[in-house]
Amino acid sequence: MANYDNAPFEIHVHGDVPLRSDVTFAQLQEALSPLWKYAGAKSLADGAESAYEEEPGIKFDAHEHLLTMCWTVNGDEDFRQSLDEMCMSLNDLADAGAAIEVTFYDADFDEEESDSEAESRDDFLMLFVGPTPAAIMQVQRDLLVQDVINLMERHFDASELSGVVGEIDKLFAQRFDALASSLELGKPPRGSGGGGHGGGRRPRHLH
């Protein structure tokens, strides 16, 4: 896809994804192809640099088995499709659950020049990837607990919040049980040669 010179958004992708120890650069290049192709590049090496020089861009630490992204590209709403494709591919390479933050900055909005009723089209997405639904739910749970504790510590001591954390864990346990039950229902009965109903496929990513 050609680069967007007059794109309505500056899109920033930020996150660290632990990768399996056997993941190669070639595999990662293929998984991230929706990003670098969107930027108009011919390879990951060509497209790894951010639109801003001060940002490290897309980095692969082969020794630590870690993908690091702090990368900005000019684009439009259609970039969301590239994000979906990237998440599906990274699920197959991830060693643990990870969160990826994506911010759409309205490139045309000028707060000083706009009238008082004008609103910026800025948007923020939190995407999650991981090798299993359980790994994805774990990182979602950890982020939620962190956010809730940070908010409530303004009013309560951390030692008083164990009950709140316990209730959050109950909610995620219920969600995981429901997911596990739906996957079981999608499997064919034991001893049956028939196919299932498709419910056995795990979700590729969760927004």
Image (spheres, rainbow, N blue to C red):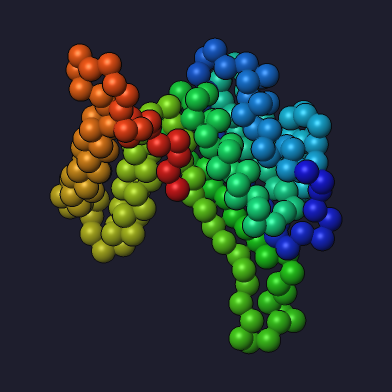
Q: Is residue 15 something one can see in this rendering?
A: no
Placement of 164 over or under 205, stated as above or below: below
Q: Position of residue 206 (x, y in %)?
A: 42, 43
How many numbered marks, from 0 up? 0
For the point 25% across and 37% down, which residue is it?
182
For the point 52% across and 14% down, which residue is it?
21
For the point 28% across and 31% down, which residue is it?
186
Placement of 21 over or under 13, stated as above or below: above
Q: Position of residue 161 (x, y in %)?
A: 20, 51
- The residue lying furthest to the bottom in this view is 116
Q: Position of residue 8 (x, y in %)?
A: 73, 63
Q: Nearer the viewer, residue 148 or 139?
A: 139
Placement of 171 over or under 187, stated as above or below: below
- Residue 58 falls in image quadrant: top right
Q: Position of residue 77 (x, y in %)?
A: 64, 57
Q: Is residue 30 something one can see in this rendering?
A: yes
Quadrant placement of the N terminus = top right
